[in-house]
Image (tube, rainbow, N blue to C red):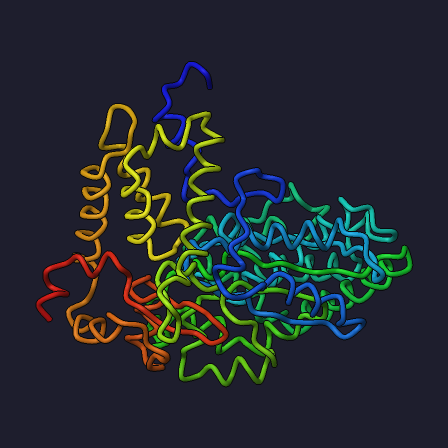
């Protein structure tokens, strides 16, 4: 790394798509700036659940750091000494094993079954070093139902349904046939899976542990598009299948798109899951509607710390990167308190230059480039509505347009006891926005 020039080292330490592991020294706790301590709340819920499982939804804007937070939660649940014992956590990354552009409950069900078996085997939970007899039997039935429609690999026969997950992802042309076969066995498969979870929870608790927690990450990254039957893909999985998602009988956390919290059908989720966890909000870089201007300093301090730690990891001095003390605040303000956007803007500015420091001109060019991409993507019917969020608003309409504004990061949600909403600050730089 020493032979790499400083600006390249900085860019490499600012990958906006990298989820930080719990021990990563670049991690910053943004809880105070966000106005909520979401991990503490979720851990309490799980610890206090006892034998009655908690089924939780974990929402927030794309790229806000949900995976990093959930990785820290996993470490806390697996590693903390607690009166209730340690959990065995099954981490399921749907983005790596399913197609986020076309995902439905059957795909998810077989993935959960496969990943739970793998984790129980790896954790050497007593009685689970071999696959469930019932799941093995169902695996044979599933292969029989499929017949010649698709060729399933035997490479992962020690983990029933593992190879089926791969086929669902890798063979779009056979996906309908695969889903039909799974649907025909869905009730039996869910029952067998729940029996596996019940037995595993009991085995973990006999060993002094707290039980199982499934963390299902990446579902909020599903593309949002209309299906041939007129239902968008988010509603197809989370609304139409909410009862099935909530039927998994163990502690489970699903990441979900923030827009679902503002769906007219949100009551369906409430009936299936009960209490909602508040979405992970943006980091406050401007005061809310009822706040004093000075209250923005906590958020700016946290973002300064984030940039400082990235510089430290790059082995460069912060003042060498930002000798002009107007540049880093400008980038933070233009990010709107969105960590991924801040890293994206920093990298885009750095890539305008051959060497440090990051200049104001390069920072402004990075913002312009992002602004131009927003100009191309924002539908015509959004502009009048976006102007309403130029100042902090305490509410947002529950319709399709406003759901899309939240999902596609045109409007940001913040929190200070109660939520408020503002337009993405980069949109404010566009002439079309100013001319509305």
Q: Is residue 312 above or below residue 174?
A: above
> Residue 286: image x %, image y %?
35, 62
Q: Position of residue 263 (x, y in %)?
A: 41, 79
Q: Left or right: where does residue 376 sit relative to residue 171?
A: left
Left or right? Give the position of 246 relative to 388: right
Q: How many marks?
A: 0
Tell me what residue is drawn at x 48 percent, y 59 percent: 33
Identify the residue at horizontal 39%, vertical 73% (top origin). 420
Which residue is outermost to the top?
A: 3
43, 259: nearer the viewer: 43
Give the vertical position of 396 relative to 353 (above or below): below
* Residue at 48% across, 77% down: 239
Residue 245 placement: quadrant: bottom right
The foreground one among 8 and 401 is: 8
Q: Quick check: 354 left or right of 33? A: left
Work out which quarter of the rendered image holds the C terminus and state it: bottom left
Q: Closer to the camera, 328 or 138?
A: 328
Q: Quadrant of residue 242?
A: bottom right
Indicate left or right for 29 with 103 as reference: right
Give whichever of 136, 275 is nearer the camera: 275
Q: Position of residue 109 (x, y in %)?
A: 60, 63
Residue depicted at x 22% and y 32%: 352
Question: Percent x, y for residue 354?
Answer: 25, 24
């Amino acid at each position: 790394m020493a032979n790499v020039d400083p600006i390249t080292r900085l860019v490499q330490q600012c990958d906006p798509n990298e989820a930080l592991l719990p021990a990563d020294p670049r991690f910053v706790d943004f809880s105070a700036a966000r106005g909520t301590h979401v991990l503490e709340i979720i851990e309490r819920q799980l610890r206090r659940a006892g034998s009655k499982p908690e089924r939780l939804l974990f929402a927030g804007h794309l790229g806000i750091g949900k995976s990093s937070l959930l990785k820290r939660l996993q470490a806390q649940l697996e590693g903390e000494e607690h009166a209730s014992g340690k959990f065995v956590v099954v981490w399921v990354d749907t983005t790596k094993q399913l197609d986020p552009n076309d995902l439905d409950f059957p795909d998810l069900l077989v993935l959960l079954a496969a990943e739970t078996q793998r984790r129980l085997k790896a954790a050497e939970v007593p009685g689970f070093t071999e696959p469930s007899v019932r799941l093995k039997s169902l695996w044979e039935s599933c292969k029989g139902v499929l017949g010649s429609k698709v060729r399933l690999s035997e490479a992962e026969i020690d983990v029933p349904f593992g190879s089926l997950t791969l086929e669902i992802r890798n063979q779009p042309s056979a996906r309908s046939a695969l889903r039909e076969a799974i649907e025909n066995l869905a009730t039996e498969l869910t029952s067998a899976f729940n029996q596996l979870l019940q037995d595993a929870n009991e085995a973990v608790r006999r060993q002094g542990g707290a039980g199982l927690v499934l963390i299902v990450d990446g579902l909020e990254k599903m593309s949002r598009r209309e299906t041939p039957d007129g239902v968008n893909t988010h509603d197809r999985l989370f609304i139409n299948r909410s009862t099935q998602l909530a039927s998994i009988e163990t502690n489970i956390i699903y990441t979900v798109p923030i827009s679902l919290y503002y769906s007219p059908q949100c009551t369906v989720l409430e009936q299936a899951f009960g209490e909602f966890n508040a979405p992970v909000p943006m980091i406050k870089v401007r005061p809310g509607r009822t706040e004093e201007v000075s209250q923005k300093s906590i958020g700016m301090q946290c973002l300064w710390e984030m940039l400082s730690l990235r510089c430290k990891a790059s082995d460069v001095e912060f003042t060498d990167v930002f000798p002009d003390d107007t540049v880093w605040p400008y980038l933070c303000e233009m990010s709107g308190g969105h960590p991924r956007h801040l890293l994206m803007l920093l990298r885009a500015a750095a890539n305008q230059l051959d060497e440090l420091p990051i200049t104001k001109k390069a920072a402004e060019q990075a913002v312009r480039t992002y602004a131009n991409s927003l100009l191309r993507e924002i539908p015509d019917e959004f502009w009048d509505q976006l102007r309403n969020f130029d100042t902090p608003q305490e509410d947002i309409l529950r319709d399709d347009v406003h759901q899309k504004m939240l999902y596609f990061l045109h409007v940001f949600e913040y929190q200070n006891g109660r939520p408020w909403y503002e337009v993405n600050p980069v949109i404010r730089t566009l002439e079309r926005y100013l001319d509305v």
